[in-house]
């Protein structure tokens, strides 16, 4: 049996007396598009923070690509091949859209350079060409010279996604990638992520509330409730799971 790309076992995490994650198991195969869903307060964001290295679990083990990364800081996980975006897009707001992508590309190429060093670099023609190509692919070419701080919410999220993929991750983690988007931007984002996934260059792990996004992207789903896994499996299996329907107030989880 092939070893999962990401394998988290028995993950527990609490804040003081409050237990947020209670023995969570999660396995993601290479090429999988795995979505973690659950009501507010289910522990999704805390789980993401544990898997990305922002938090260290109280108990349990996280393995990525055969490495024990349980206590490994986030920057080292990034170099192993874990990329991440956030609910609130994190970009360099005073740099242009183009410059943000250049910094992300240079960060991948120059593994030891600090952000301050990267900002002083004069990018090569190869890097500039690659940045322009990414802006075209992400429909950001028309705002290439805009400061990132002036972009629309949808364009900021697209820029953050482009920057994460510039590092060529083996696993891309997206935390609520369409949160706050207008319907048109949300559909554009789903189409873009689907096209990128079809290339087979990375696996995907995301949290999402919008069921259109969930069932439009997922090859497998894990459902959290009060920090516990109550279901995991194919979208069809999760959709028909009685416990999942109960958690979602008796409604089919494909309804949004």
Image (cartoon, rainbow, N blue to C red):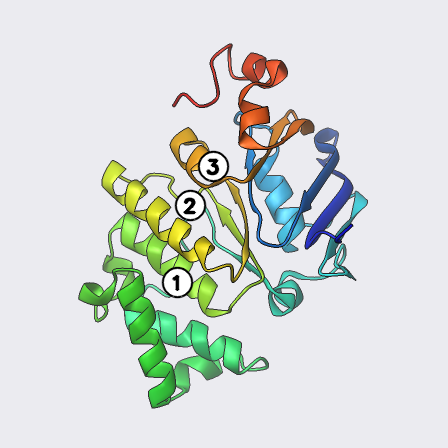
For the residue carrying disc 3, how many other residues have a C-alpha within 10 Å: few (<14), some (14-19), or many (20+)?
many
Mark 2 vs 3: CB contact within 8 A: yes
Q: Is 9 rendered above or below residue 20?
A: below
Residue ranking furthest to the top: 250
Sooner in the amino-acid sequence: mark 2 or mark 3:
2
Q: CA distance from mark 3 to mark 1?
A: 19 Å
Which residue in the structure is indicated by mark 3? 208
Q: Nearer the viewer, residue 15 or 221?
A: 221
Q: Secondary structure at mark 1?
A: helix
Sooner in the amino-acid sequence: mark 2 or mark 1:
1
Q: CA distance from mark 2 to mark 1?
A: 12 Å
Q: Residue at x 39, y 62 (%)?
A: 162
Q: Secondary structure at mark 3?
A: loop
Q: Residue at x 57, y 53 (%)?
A: 31
Which residue in the structure is indicated by mark 2? 177
Q: Is 124 rendered above or below residue 218?
A: below
Residue 186 appears in view: yes
Q: Is residue 36 left or right of residue 116?
A: right
Q: Which mark identifies residue 128?
A: none
Res. 247 image quadrant: top right
For the residue carrying disc 2, how many other residues have a C-alpha within 10 Å: few (<14), some (14-19), or many (20+)?
many
Sooner in the amino-acid sequence: mark 3 or mark 1:
1
Which residue in the structure is indicated by mark 1? 162
Mark 2 vs 1: CB contact within 8 A: no
Q: Is residue 223 left or right of residue 65?
A: left
Q: Residue at x 40, y 51 (%)?
A: 193
Q: Nearer the viewer, residue 89 or 127?
A: 127
Q: Residue at x 50, y 69 (%)?
A: 167
């Amino acid at each position: 049996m092939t070893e999962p790309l990401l394998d988290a076992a028995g993950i527990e995490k609490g804040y003081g007396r409050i237990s947020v994650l209670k023995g969570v198991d999660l396995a993601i195969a290479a090429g999988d598009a795995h979505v973690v869903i659950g009501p507010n307060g289910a522990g999704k964001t805390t789980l993401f923070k544990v898997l990305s290295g922002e938090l260290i679990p109280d108990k349990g083990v996280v393995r990525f690509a055969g490495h024990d990364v349980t206590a490994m800081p986030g920057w080292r996980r990034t170099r192993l091949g874990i990329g991440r975006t956030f609910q609130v897009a994190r970009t360099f707001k005073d740099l242009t859209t183009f410059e943000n992508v250049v910094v992300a590309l240079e960060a991948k190429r120059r593994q030891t350079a600090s952000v301050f060093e990267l900002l002083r670099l004069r990018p090569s023609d190869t890097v500039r060409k690659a940045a322009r190509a990414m802006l075209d692919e992400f429909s950001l070419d028309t705002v290439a010279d805009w400061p990132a701080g002036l972009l629309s919410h949808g364009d900021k999220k697209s820029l953050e996604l482009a920057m994460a993929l510039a590092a060529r991750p083996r696993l891309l983690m997206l935390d609520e990638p369409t949160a706050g988007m207008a319907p048109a931007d949300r559909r554009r984002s789903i189409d873009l992520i689907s096209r990128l996934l079809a290339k087979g260059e990375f696996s995907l792990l995301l949290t999402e509330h919008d069921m259109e996004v969930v069932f439009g992207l997922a090859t497998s789903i894990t459902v959290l409730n009060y920090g516990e896994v109550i279901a995991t499996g194919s979208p069809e299996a999760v959709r028909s799971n009685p416990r999942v329907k109960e958690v979602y107030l008796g409604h089919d989880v494909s309804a949004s």
